[in-house]
């Protein structure tokens, strides 16, 4: 399977977001996120370590955006602010 550079970039920003949320005190780290959503942490670590070989599930991005107010534009395109300033 060939993962596009855009897909790899999104995966990297996803894990950057986890790190930023931990730094900002919103979560303790990856395990907090995986436990909350019933995700196998080791599978997600594999995605982190090999983004060129594995696909990040799109719902994981949605969880970050919904739960922590992360900007979808930032995660998907790498543009704009990290936190979504437009709230519904």
Image (cartoon, rainbow, N blue to C red):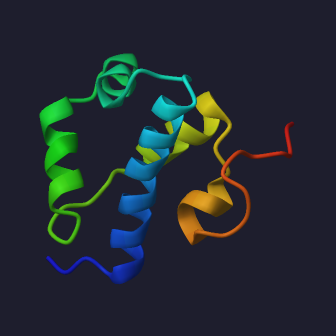
In the image, is residue 69 above or below residue 83?
A: above
Q: Where's residue 32, x and y in %?
A: 36, 20
Q: Where's residue 69, x and y in %?
A: 68, 37
Q: Quadrant of the C terminus?
A: top right
In front of the other: 24 or 10 = 24
Relative to 7, 88 lies left or right = right
In the image, is residue 33 above or below residue 44?
A: above
Relative to 23, 39 lies left or right = left
Q: Quadrant of the N terminus?
A: bottom left
Residue at 35% across, 50% down: 57
Location of residue 5 (image quadrant): bottom left
In front of the other: 82 or 35 = 82
Residue at 86% across, 46% down: 86
Residue at 15% across, 62% down: 50
Relative to 23, 9 lies left or right = left
Location of residue 56 (image quadrant): bottom left
Residue at 49% across, 46% down: 17
Q: Where's residue 23, x and y in %?
A: 50, 33
In the image, is residue 44 above or below residue 78?
A: above
């Amino acid at each position: 399977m060939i993962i596009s550079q855009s897909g790899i970039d999104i995966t990297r920003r996803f894990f950057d977001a986890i790190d930023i949320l931990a730094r900002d005190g919103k979560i303790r780290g990856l395990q907090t996120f995986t436990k909350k959503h019933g995700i196998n942490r080791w599978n997600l670590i594999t995605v982190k370590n090999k983004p060129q070989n594995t696909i990040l599930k799109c719902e994981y991005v949605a969880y970050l955006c919904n739960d922590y107010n992360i900007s979808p534009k930032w995660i998907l395109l790498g543009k704009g602010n990290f936190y979504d300033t437009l709230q519904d």
